[in-house]
Amino acid sequence: MSAHRPPSSANVSPKTPRPSSPGRASAALCRLLDATVAALQSIRAGQSGTAALDAVEASLRPGVQALLFQALRNLGRAQALRRQLAPRNPPPRVDALLCTALALAWDPQTAPYEPFTLVNQAVEAAKRNPATRAQASFINACLRRFLRERQALVAATDSDDMAVWNHPAWWIRRLRQDHPQHWQQILQANNAHAPMVLRVSKSKSTPALYQQALDAINIESTLVGEWGVALHRAVPVQQLPGFAEGVVSVQDAAAQMAAPLLLQGLDARQPLRLLDACAAPGGKTAHLLEWADALHAPWQVTALEVDAARAARIHDNLHRLGLSAQVLVADAGAPQDWWRQHCGGELFDAILLDAPCTASGIVRRHPDVRWLRRETDVAQLAALQARLLAALWPLLRPGGRLLYCTCSVFRAEGDAQVQAFLAHNTDAQLLASPGHLIPGKPDKSGALRDNGPGEHDGFFYALLHKSTA
């Protein structure tokens, strides 16, 4: 579970269609740019992409998200170009407008509109907004110079790692250290668009049958993993056959590995007691329950979530799927507040800990994450993960399994975290596990090839067994 929760529509492709003529873009594009600038300014102030987009007028939101995501994926280059054009920092709103325009227009091959149209409408947006009106001439001069000298200005920023990779410098350094063979691949994947992936309910259909249903309505797809279907083009969930009836759920292929990994080696015929800690929005809880339903297994599943609003999302998702679990609004790190009162003080057979993390493995879906995070967040979140592991391990019965996972590619939240845990818990044994999964990469050296889900987000998995001795 990431500590950051981005927009629910993050699977929608952010590519905006290029209009056939500048005239069609003018008024609408001016408004879209102004709203995109406001969203970028909010993110720079520390607000999540979710909140920034929620504040946008509903009719503008899809277009603003498209432009915002592209701007965020090119923000490092835009900031370097802005420094070339204006070495002194302009006021925040002016800087956000310049960076938005530059991020969208710097590469004509990927620009959502013709660069001169973007510049024209950015200047028009500056004139219309009271916060930038006084600086409209300055903005116009900067952006017109960019159009004239684009090649030279871009070349001047090519030696800047932040401009080349569009990530903070500390993030690039950490990836180089953590993944010396794959750091460039990770950064490239983070700047690409992630596919929309579905998980087919084990009790209601099969991936092959569901793919046939998609083919019947001209939605192309590819099978991934054991129960996944990746769409070649994202579509609204309302267009998916059987979505309302719970036949499929949206879940990345990497996240779909959690339930099978946790359950492997356990006797599914027994009345297992399962705990999904840090469970919102409930995708992994639902996957466990789908297995129980398909196997007619008498399992008791408890889902914990510390935030009441996010716990409500677990209920909503389970309701759509026709499933039920014990959902508790409680802190997984403080079992004294809930374990005996709500779980009878009985030990669990298996625990899934999808711990809060930097979300560094899902940046391609949520491009605001890289600009929201600070380097100090890594150590703070690693300390929280260690506290959760220490609190939950005593609740696991001898012979049981705990699956620790994060949607992070940073080793402090993965390998290093687990090695530290093993060093302090002699009754813990690391079983065969995928370890760090690289975003966008079908497999990696040392991963469980039998469980390779194909194209996926960045993730980490460690399956821990509790000895009976």
Image (cartoon, rainbow, N blue to C red):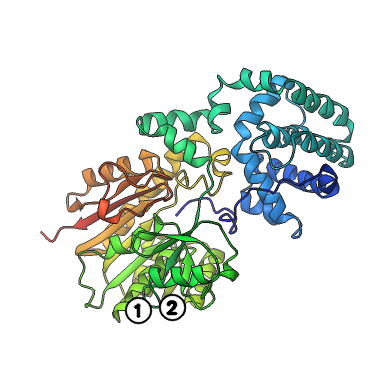
> Which residue is tagged 2?
323
Q: Residue at x 79, y 25 (%)?
A: 142
Measured as percent of width and height from the top left, residue 379 is found at 42, 38
Query: Of helix, strand and loop, which one carries label 1?
Result: helix
Q: Residue at x 51, y 44 (%)?
A: 363
Q: Is residue 412 visible?
A: yes
Measured as percent of width and height from the top left, residue 378 is found at 44, 39
Q: Quadrant of residue 75?
A: top right
> Which residue is tagged 1?
293
**Are the residues at dot 1 and dot 2 in contact (C-beta closer than 8 Å)?**
yes
Give the vertical position of 253 relative to 375 (above or below).
below
Sequence-first disc among 1 and 2: 1
Give the vertical position of 359 relative to 188 (above or below).
below
Q: Considering the image in quadrants, where does the N terminus appear?
A: bottom left
Q: Quadrant of residue 419?
A: top left
The disc labelled 2 sits on which kind of residue?
Leu
Identify the mark at residue 200; answer none if there is no mark.
Answer: none
Measured as percent of width and height from the top left, residue 25 is found at 81, 46
